[in-house]
Image (spheres, grey):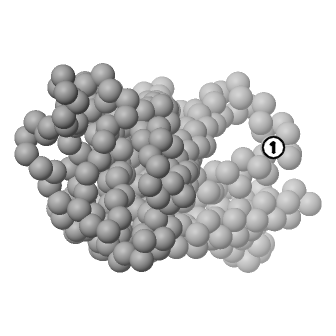
Amino acid sequence: MALATTYYRLFAAIVGETFLLTTYGVFVLKSLLLLRRSTTQQRSGYLLTVAILTMFALAIVLWTLDLVNFIMEAKITLIQNSEDPIDTKANKALAFIFRLEGAQDLLYAYMTLLGDAVIIDRIWKLQAFSGSLWVLSVPCAFLFGSVVATIMLTTCVAQLGPGNLQESFQNPLCNKVQSITFVMPCANTAVTTILIGVTTWKYRKSIAPLFRNNDSDVGSRKTKRTQCERILVLLLESGILYFLFFATQVIVATPPVHTWTESLPGLVFALKMYTYSTSVIVGMYPTILIVLANSKHNVLDRAAASSGMTSLPSIQIARWHTDADRTPTYPTGQPEIGTRQLDEIELDDLHALSLNDEEKGETHPKLRVAGPAAFPHG
């Protein structure tokens, strides 16, 4: 009965992981299409493409190893050496699984490392550090800590013999290193999520009034504002969920909690499902972050449709300065006018508006663009 329950849990975990991997593949395809259509920062786009494909390949490898473990455990326990006692065959199956577990832990650590690098790149892209580069040094420091911990974990795994994995992770150093590979991404995610939250708050405080207080094209501007906020909120909410994902790993890895969870059958099953899905989730979140940060056509589709335009003006914001007779002048000539395709409008420029407001002490800048309709770049 216990053996049947074990295989039922493993089968359910494999099915859940397969479903998540399929969903992950959809997001990978979407992100690659968005990066391919982007004409700005091509070098960064190529590096992101390599990172996305590498993480997805690692997720497929980890899924394959989970499937191999599931099949081989059943084969060794139920089919091979039928004359051996069931306990002996179960021990042989566990020995086979432990030989692969070190490789799985190591691949997962490198996948997490890539994911953290992508997240920091997206924070840079969104200018979520509010113009203070030192703020960005905090997640970079955690990323460096992850690199060091991953190298140490690689050393631990490289020193293993075929059947010594379980004993190796009883070693205090290797055990702590494995825990650090969970703690560093958790801290990194917490910091980056806070930065996204601050960016969302500043947008609502400084930039949303531009759309609410402009009399022309009110409907399209309010739609744009709402959709920009929606993307930022999605980034914030997904970051919170990703933080909770890593926080759960850190908590469950502590010995008292681990011992307690082993005594509850229902929780054992839930943790089995969770454990098998971790390799997919750790790559899916950075990919979703790329999709959200680059889905610029979702922000301005309705605005463009309302004006009948196929491209939107690309403008450089210029301040009005008012002298004694209230005559507006520009400090540095006319605004720069150009056209960019709809899906090239950057969310990054949201920060530029709020930064200019803070520097000048103004809350409602005037915008000038050429063309039949005016859409603020953001």
Q: Residue at x 48, y 71 (%)?
A: 306
Give the camera-side residue of 308 and 184: 308
Q: Position of residue 372 (x, y in %)?
A: 32, 68
Residue 32 visible, this angle:
no
Q: Residue at x 71, y 52 (%)?
A: 272
Q: Residue at x 25, y 24 (%)?
A: 359
**Within 10 angstroms of label 1, few (less than 14), some, or many (20 or more) residues?**
few
In the current view of this chain or complex, which residue is farthest to the front? 325
Q: Amino acid at mark 1?
A: Leu
Q: Residue at x 32, y 72 (%)?
A: 311
161 to 208, vertically: above or below: below
Residue 325 visible, this angle:
yes
Q: Position of residue 43 (x, y in %)?
A: 17, 62
On the rendered image, what quadrant is the N terminus found in? bottom right
333 to 346, vertically: above or below: above
Residue 323: which quarter of the image?
top left
Q: Position of residue 152 (x, y in %)?
A: 33, 37
Residue 13: which quarter of the image?
bottom right
Count the marks: how many?
Answer: 1
Q: Which residue is mark 1?
A: 267
269 to 140, vertically: above or below: below
284 displayed left or right of 206: right
> For the residue labelled by badge 1, is the local secondary structure a helix, a strand or a loop?
helix
Q: Position of residue 85 (x, y in %)?
A: 79, 62
Give the camera-side residue of 30 and 307: 307
Give the camera-side residue of 81 and 262: 262
In the current view of this chain or complex, which residue is farthest to the left? 332
